[in-house]
Amino acid sequence: MGELRFVHMADLHLGYRQYNLTERLKDFGKAALHATEKALEYEPDFVLVAGDIFHDSRPYPGAIRQALQIFTKFRDAGIPVYAIRGNHDASYARSERLGGDALHLLEDVGLITYIRDKVVTFEKKGKPKACICGVGYYGRNTEQKLTEVLKQNKALLEEKGVLKILMAHVFIEGMVPQYDISAYILTQENFDYIALGHYHGYFRDDNARLYAPGAIEHTSVSEWDDPDRGVNLVTATPQIKAKSWTVDVQRLTVPTRPKKAFEINLGVIEAHEVEPQAREVVKQHDEPGAILRGVLRGRLRGDTFAFINTSNIGTAATQALLCNITNELETTTLSIKEEATFEEVIEEVLRKQLGIKKTAVKTWKLLVTDMMEILKENQPDTVSKALERLDKFTTPKKKRSKKPKRTHAQEVEQ
Amino acid sequence: MAKTKSTNPCIGNVIGEARPSMVYVVVSRELIRQKPLEIGEFVAISYPEQVIDSPVLGMVTKLSLQNIEIPESLIRGPESFERLGPLGDLSQGEVLVAQVRIVGYIDNGILILPRFPPVPGAKVRRAPLKILQQVFGHGHIRLGVLRANREVEVRIDVNEMVRRHIALLAITGGGKGNTVAVAITQIIKMGGSVLVIDPHNEYHTLKEKRKKQVVIFSETGDASKGIRPIQFKLDNFGTYDLFDILRIPTNATKQRALLRLALHKVQGSAWGWNELTSAISEVADEENKYREQVIALKERMIEARELKIFDKSREIPLSTISGISLVKPRQLSIISLSGLRLEVQQAIVKRIAQKVYHGGIAWRTEAQTDKIACPTLLVVEEAHNFAPAQTFAASLEILKRIAAEGRKFGVGLCIVSQRPGKVHSDVLSQCNSFVVLRIVNPFDQQQIRQSAEAITEDLIEDLPGLNVGEAVITGSILRAPALVKIDKFVGKLGGDDVDIVGAWSTATESLASGKKSAQDYDSDSDPF
């Protein structure tokens, strides 16, 4: 008995014209093609596609042509492809009603085996047998559907010495807050490999045998954290004695278009200064062919309703494919006097807030600064100086101002 | 009513100072040698018909028997009695006095406590069956029969049991397991949902005859026997839970600090032991210290990692439509915790209780996700370990919350313990009903007295005198407190006493025969 080798890919999203750019449409096709070519190098026994081959349930002919191109490569190499329905591919009801979906089409031309909530077996001379249980996208009802499918195919799944694979297009607990199914349910039937789609990040839990290769290209900014994209290459070796299989999972990454998110920190700024300054920052981040995303940060001075032309800022990136700028500048209704010194601020507080007379402000100000020094780093010299100042306050006849000083003095003593 | 009055003959009369709640009754002398009154037996006291036209129930709480014709001052020994012989039949002087606590009378199906005492001299009869059945037989499930009136079924109100919690207290071997089994199997039959925390693997045998209704979860699980693994997502446990699970003492501040930093690092994405381990090393590298602590933490993690319980991505679902889950109508879920360290047990109980409690809130607010499918009863065996009075337990806080607020969210608590004195009073005092079997320890009796308002002194005094399988039941699950003979559970129970001497002798026999054929010794029939 030899080993079995297969490729697990998911979420190709062919036909996705992201940002309304034809280049992105091509990107998704290219990424899938790269992955296919890379996969072929390893001569896998079969290929799994865990849903969302297409981005749209009514794919454009262009997207279909991409799919034909990719899956023909596998067919020419004699490698069977097993696919399930993702949420983007088609809805179950629509597919039933309208006489099939795009995956049916691929199956009709003999490029894939479309697993519609059933178990299929992979058999090849001189190779161990594998059975693949595939459940399409049913969201929260996946669990019910899965239980049904497992029940109907009990005999097939209980066969000994067979590699058992489950393929599903779901979010499991922990991937997103509103998950579809608990991983506990998926692992109950002791599958040797659980091939997941739908989650666009890379996920693996070797203990639970849960794997998601992630989307083949970044479909949203939230996925940019992980710049790598790719597919899983799985080698499964039977352990005759233990009646189980060991699986070795390797991630094959594919090159994708560079993406970069950055912040444009502008500090406190006048509205008219935003554009030239931000453009400078954008220029620094410019990269050929890249997708850039800049976020304006800082505080706008003065006019609250100033219009910031973000698209104009984006054009500073001349080499990038696209540069999106988001405006997250804060505005304030109070005009800020930026040049004010600390002393001026203290003076204003003493006079306006506490109502201290102009003549006394100077002494108060010194007292305050001393106090701050003391609080900062307990210096004996300043302490005595401050005490002297307090003394000056207490000795004159002015009774009104006595009380607050006491408390200050106590503080100093402490 | 007049008919029932006439069926039972008068057995005695109220004497002395009668109070609305307590009277003394002189009982007919003939009864002493025929069918004496028992403690716990119910009697019917006649009130003036214009006041209360139905008989008022009372329970015998104390009995005293004297003989006024035997002057104690003259008795020196057996010869004194011989000398008294010629005086005639001494039994003529016997006086049997019963202390009777008034339970109340039925009016329109409700039990009402009279506000005034019966008249001295009022007739007392044995309680009519019909009335007893009205009082004790109206609940949903049968727990047993009245100890003194075996023909009267005692049925308890399950609504009250789940809504207002229940405590089941007894010494080991007092019949706790039996009582729980009798109750929960009937609740399941009703379509209810029960979750049992089973630290001693006592209830696994319930599955034998109820394959579909009973789901057992254990540490390792066993697919061939249909036993499911206990699994919880590691990232659902907090920093302090992990300190407990990994047994990091409070004085190991550096290890704690390192673990805290590592946890901070892994947060935000799915993580398991592997990710945590590498985060620990990374933090140590970044901080350029904690070298020894890295080793120490990894050592501590070995044991915890061997348990399959703490997983990266798998967690037993709370409620599912078709798959395995904790809370489901007509399902008894048994969480078998045997063989696990107490800290780990507590962490698991905490997680389960949290899930159920939050699920209850979600159920009540009709949220879309993570809600319980139906109200559920959480049975906590060995409750003194999970809600202890003095020591710390991770599970204490959440059990307190369920005890205090659970009823609003359809989560009932059944506290089972042989050491009520060691159960946290915030938990015990929230239980509205008590089923108390034999309790001998005075400290435990004290705790019961403080927690259970409905239990009166005289019942407490009775506790050590109960036989196995006999219980005092008080609180809202029954209309009136009663001494009950609990039914014997039909079927095998894991907590049944082991016949030690018998097991020794069979073991010796098989040892002897084992010399002839070694295979016999390994066979399943051997208890060891």
Image (spheres, coloured by chain):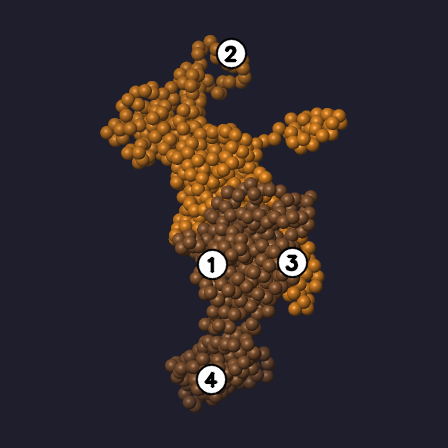
Chain colours: A brown, B orange
Mark 3 in CB contact with mark 4 (< 8 angstroms)? no
- Residue B82 has which mark? 2
Percent across and percent down for residue B397 are 50, 52
State the separation of the CA atoms marked 3 and 4: 53 Å
Secondary element at tag 1: helix
Mark 2 in CB contact with mark 3 (< 8 angstroms)? no
Query: In the rendered image, which residue does mark 3 sit on?
Result: A43
- Residue at position x 32%, y 32% from top? B105
Give the mark, 3 or 1, whose residue is nearer the N terminus.
3
Q: Residue furthest bottom?
A: A359
Percent across and percent down for residue A130 are 60, 48
* Mark 2 crowd level (few <14, some 14–19, many ≥20, 10 Å Cα): few
User: Are callouts 3 and 4 both on one chain?
Assistant: yes
* Mark 3 crowd level (few <14, some 14–19, many ≥20, 10 Å Cα): some
> In this orientation, does residue B188 appear?
yes
- The amino acid type of the residue labelled 1 equals Ala
- Residue A275 has which mark? 4
Above or below residue B479? Residue A62 is below
Query: In the rendered image, which residue does mark 1 sit on?
Result: A102
Is B207 in front, or is B261?
B207
Secondary element at tag 4: helix
- Chain of the residue on which disc 2 is drawn: B
Foreground mark, 1 or 2, reads: 1
